[in-house]
Image (spheres, helix red, strand yellow):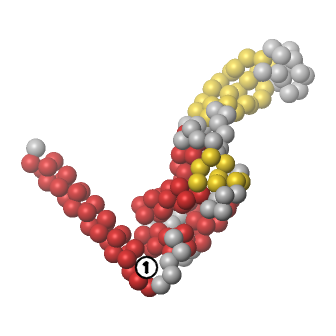
Amino acid sequence: MRCPFCQNEDTRVVDSRLSEDRDAVRRRRGCEACGERFSTLEEANLKLPFVVKSNGDREHYDESKLARGLERSLEKRPVESDQIEQILHRIKRNLLTCGEREINARDIGELVMNELREVDQVAYVRFASVYRSFQDVDAFSAEIKRLQAETLRGRRANREKELDKLES
């Protein structure tokens, strides 16, 4: 790595550490020529897929657009901003590792709904109402009933796991 101070190409790594999210390596380097120290950040260079909209248009993935949608659905809900960041991070990681050059906006919406379902069910219904374009109260009601059934199945499965642990 070239020294940013004197442009010498002979630098050495003094210290290496993983970043907080463990997706990058922070390296402290020293220049052999001028003695200055500097930090570098090494991370995988992966490209995000293009988003294919419902009308066929293609656009670059825009995390701020997704963040605004999440924030609207989570408005006045007991969800911390770091949880929103974690959701955005998981979605981005999923998109980076999917291996596709293009992804449908609908698939991203499904990823968001899966995340919201786990974090806050009210926010999930809010997002789903816009995403799935609910036209009437019956559509809302059907989605809420489906969510309640999923929650009940999840609780039963958890109880069964706890009973199995107690029996063994």
36 is higher (above) or lower (below) than 133: above
- Picture coordinates of residue 116 (x, y %)? 47, 63
| Viewer can see residue 138 | yes
Q: Residue furthest front?
A: 56
- For disc 1, the neighbor class at 10 Å (few under 14, some 14 to 19, many from 20) is some
Identify the residue at image location x=45%, y=59%: 114
Identify the residue at image location x=64%, y=32%: 44
Q: Residue furthest right?
A: 6
Amino acid residing under circle 1: Ala
Q: Residue furthest bottom?
A: 137
Task: Using residue 65 as the reference point, say whether residue 121 is left or right of it.
Answer: left
Identify the residue at image location x=51%, y=75%: 129
* The one of 162 and 11 positioned closer to us in this rendering: 162
Task: Using residue 27 as the reference point, say whether residue 20 is left or right of it.
Answer: left
* Residue marked by disc 1: 139
Identify the residue at image location x=41%, y=61%: 118
161 is higher (above) or lower (below) than 7: below
Quadrant of the drawing holding the N terminus: top right
91 is higher (above) or lower (below) than 148: above
Q: Is disc 1 placed on a helix, strand or loop?
A: helix
- Picture coordinates of residue 3 (x, y %)? 84, 23
- Picture coordinates of residue 9 (x, y %)? 83, 16
Residue 53 quadrant: bottom right
Residue 105 quadrant: bottom right
Task: Using residue 15 as the reference point, say whether residue 76 is left or right of it.
Answer: left
* The one of 108 and 159 positioned closer to us in this rendering: 108
